[in-house]
Image: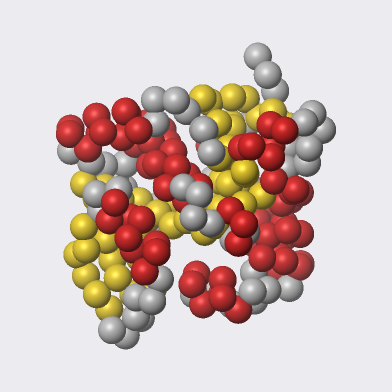
Amino acid sequence: MRLNQNILLRGKKVVLVPYTSQHVPRYHEWMKSEELQRLTASEPLTLEQEYAMQRSWREDADKCTFIVLDAEKWQAQPGTTEESCMAGDVNLFLTDLGDPSLGEIEVMIAEPDCRGKGFGTEAVLMMMAYGVTKLGLTKFEAKIGQGNEPSIQMFQKLHFEQVAVSSVFQEVTLRLLMREPERQWLVEQTSHVEEKPYRDGKWEPR
């Protein structure tokens, strides 16, 4: 999605930046992990295929992707590369043609050292706020493998409710409707987030 290609979202624990070609080598290394392939229901790709996937995600209007950076590392010293701060990614899929207000959300914290620190929670909150304010979304769904209990619990803590279980795909579907109380809650949870201009892999301070 080109809509988010020139913005950076800065939170307390994580920074969200558009997925660009500079992030692909690290992402490709992550996805060699059998654990991550299982948790994300993904097939391993060649590096060339990974670059093609990054380009398609940038161009496709129904996919919105941010790379999740460790904010502490990113802010530690000038000149720190984004690749060295990468923690995972967060995605929105707008694939229900009958309901453009519904977004399927997923998050992956790929770096083992970054797990259990609240990175995934803040990334999801920031992405939901972006979806509500920029994409007009009013409903979110998360489809999670039945064995991925930490992820299921995280979404439940964010007020998602289980609406379906698929024994065929061995996944649980959770949903959150953004009524007025939920919108207010989301605003409160993300009031600290700053939006900054982003160009060619660099943050442009105003």
- Residue 188, percent from left and from top: 32, 28
Q: 195 above or below 131? A: above
Say whether residue 135 is visible: no
- State whether residue 24 is above or below residue 29: above
- Image x and y of residue 20, in percent: 69, 47
Rendered residue at 62%/52% (across/down): 87
Query: Could you tell me if residue 94 is visible in this image?
Result: yes
Q: Tell me how the rendering is colored.
A: secondary structure
* Image coords of residue 192 (percent x, y): 44, 25
Tell me the quarter of the picture where residue 25 sits: bottom right
Q: Residue at x 82, y 33 (%)?
A: 79
> Does 119 sit left or right of 156 as displayed?
right
Near-viewer residue (146 or 62): 146
59 vs 165, nearest the viewer: 165
Quadrant where the C terminus sits is top right
Q: Toward which corner of the image does residue 82 lie, by quadrant?
A: top right
Total marks in image = 0
Which residue occupies 60% across, 61% down? 112
- Residue placed most toward the observer, 6 or 170: 170
Residue 42's x, y, as percent?
54, 74
Taking 33 as reference, is 168 left or right?
left
Residue furthest out toward the bottom? 168
